[in-house]
Amino acid sequence: MNEYDSNRILDITKKINYFQTLEKSEADCYIINTCHIREKATEKVFHDVGRVKKVYRNKKKPILIIAGCVAQAEGDLILKKDKYVDAVIGPQSYQSINKVIKEIEKKRKQFDLTNFDTIKKFDQLKIINNNDTNVSSFLTIQEGCDKFCKFCVVPYTRGPEYSRNFSEVLKEADSLIRNGAKELTLLGQNVNAYNDNNKRLSDIIYALEEKKGLLRIRYTTSHPKDMTQDLIEAHKDCSKLMPLLHLPVQSGSDKILKNMNRKHNIREYLEIIRRLKEKNPKIKFASDFIIAYPGEEDYDFNKTCKLMETVKFINSYSFIYSPRPGTPASEMNMVDNLIAKKRLTKFQNIANKIKLNYKKNFLNKVVKVLFENKMKNEKNQYFGRDEYQNPVIVFSKKNLIGEEKRVLIKKFSQHTIYGELVDSDNILAA
Ligand code: SAH
Ligand code: SF4
């Protein structure tokens, strides 16, 4: 979502003639967009500010703005601690960034913009064209969260759940498709909680399914509690909806899920997976895990490992629990750090083994790849992703950007799969 927001910030600042520069030491204005989800976020900001100061030591000071969730959560502290920072702008206020830049140009005083006015934000953003021209583009449809998992800062930094207007979303999708998007990823902190006058996420997916030129639809991140039947049906009906679902579970232990206030248990989670597989046997799953949440014992951790082995997630993001200021879990007793580290290593070893076995399956199979760009340093090599978002590289003398092609997989490394273009119908089925 920060990538989407950063692109939108660029769309806005263009209006006052501030354009992106790749020359890091030549900027008139420096915007650092930040994430607060895990530890050391604020420290990193001061680190980044220090780097900017160093680069501009003998030059004119650029306008320096801290945007995003760290600005939202700790903006006043940042402004107080470092006068080099001209403004902090929260994720629901960046529509006003031009006003702030203009004010700073005039009188160098500090600005704090951390209001929660999501409606106003999207009202103002809808008149500014989304200039993203990527083959695979992001489209934010929902923001914020009302679920208050005990470990998470999102409800405090992004504010309450808000769904964008249905027709505005489709308008932006049309414009992205005109710009060349072949794949759209619908974004939201709780994307499947989307509800605009009873239009749900499934309604957006069915509408996008009809769009000529669009080849692939994805959505992220969904909460298990909001995996409603209409959305599950869409996985059967919509051929453009990719057969990979990122469905964070956090832990395999019901006790921990309850302590996290996750509002679902493992039986319900596995039931959702079963129902999705029933509708679309090709579907595979990715997930997020928090290791060593307060109160996690060996018994609970082993359940998380067991869940990994049961579902065989093809991708997983796992981190040691990180206490976030102001969240209820930050008051709880932490698991010993050494135990936490050991558990994370053990869990990631299991996850990597599962992933490796999954990748081995690919050898000599044919997969469908949507090509996104040309490799920078390699001649005639193109980068794309298969339906399960695995990165695939092929050699081609013909420009493949924006095309979906069948690729025979020849070899793989830890992160990348290499293949050759083919003309076969032998598509990998599962
Ligand atoms: N809305 C999504 C997740 C959004 S946050 C959901 O409910 O699943 C993205 C991921 O960051 C989470 O899935 C979680 O695994 C991780 N995360 C959030 N807060 C964290 C914390 N305090 N410590 C460690 N990981 C955290
Ligand atoms: Fe955070 Fe997701 Fe829980 Fe909301 S549902 S509080 S975004 S983890």
Image: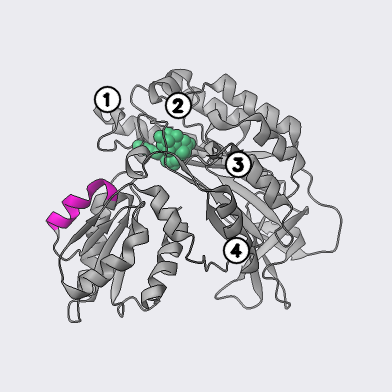
Q: Which residue is mark 3?
A: 201
* Residue drawn 19% across the image and 54% down it: 78
Q: Which range of residues does the magenta coloring cover?
A: 72-81
Residue 345 appears anywhere in the view: no
Q: Which residue is mark 2?
A: 262
Q: Which residue is mark 1?
A: 332
Position in image of residue 161 (x %, y %): 44, 39
Among the 4 quarters of the image, the one containing residue 148: top left
Position in image of residue 383 (x %, y %): 63, 66
Label for residue 69? none
Few, some or many C-alpha atoms within 10 Å of disc 4 (few <14, some 14-19, many ≥20)? many
Instruction: Mark 3 vs mark 2: give the one in front.
Output: 3
Amino acid found under the numbered disc labelled 2: Arg
Q: Earlier in the sequence, mark 2 or mark 1?
A: 2
Amino acid found under the numbered disc labelled 3: Leu
Among the 4 quarters of the image, the one containing residue 351: top right
Q: Earlier in the sequence, mark 3 or mark 4?
A: 4
Q: Which residue is mark 4?
A: 176
Q: Relative to 139, is 400 above or below?
A: below
Q: Earlier in the sequence, mark 4 or mark 1?
A: 4
Q: Earlier in the sequence, mark 3 or mark 2?
A: 3
- Marks 1 and 3: CB-CB under 8 Å? no
Q: Main secondary structure of the magenta part?
A: helix
Amino acid found under the numbered disc labelled 4: Leu
Instruction: Mark 1 vs mark 3: give the one in front.
Output: 3
Few, some or many C-alpha atoms within 10 Å of disc 3 (few <14, some 14-19, many ≥20)? many
